[in-house]
Amino acid sequence: NADQRTTVITTYKALGDFAEAVTAKMTQTTAGSPEDQLRGPFENFMTTASHKLGADAVCTGETPLLNRLGRPDYAVHLKKLLAGYVELKAPGVGADARRFTGHNLAQFRRFSAIPNILYTDGTEWALYRGGELVGQIVRLSVDAKGRNAASVEEAHAVERLLRDFLSWEP
């Protein structure tokens, strides 16, 4: 239907804006923490994409979890209620927990207690509930310039993943 096509096109454009912003940050003469370069672009992406889904998500950074489990990069709120968490990974790390080692694996094991968490390194996107992968990992075909972040099919897969993430209920 027309509304769904508009949402996918908005997600496609938002992914392009996200990738272009990350590429701009990652190609400057001074280098920052690779993971941290995703923060601003991710917040902008989440605002745009969630708004088109009718959700108006608000991302709160570095929210500590109970029992010293850690601090995911974001707690995501809808209408001031917690919807889930987001963990950003440095570009190239991926979102497939089966490939995590060292710190990332230990952190994933702790975060497995979280009932709704989205992982992304900007190219891979995955949703986990209680440490179990929900659906499939979405992999984007980002080009060297960052603008062509995804095909329309990949944007549709990210849109479905976000819709699932944002519609979770305890």
Image (cartoon, rainbow, N blue to C red):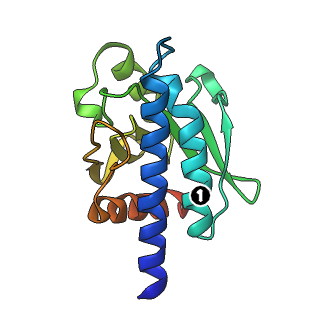
Label 1: which secondary element:
helix
Horizontal side of 165 relative to 128 (left or right) equals: right
Could you tell me residue 99's position as x and y percent? 22, 28
Q: Residue at x 31, y 26 (%)?
A: 93
50 and 136: which is toward the camera: 50
Q: Is residue 105 left or right of residue 165?
A: left
Q: Nearer the viewer, residue 6 or 138?
A: 6
- For the C terminus, the quadrant is bottom right
Q: Nearer the viewer, residue 131 or 30?
A: 30
Give the residue type that dot 1 points to. Thr
Vertical placement of residue 145 versus 9, above or below = above
Crowdedness of circle 1 by 10 Å Cα count: few (<14), some, many (20+)? some
Q: Which residue is mark 1?
A: 48
Q: Does residue 100 appear left or right of residue 37 in this picture?
A: left
Quadrant where the image shows the N terminus: bottom left
Residue 3 drawn at (x, y percent): 49, 83
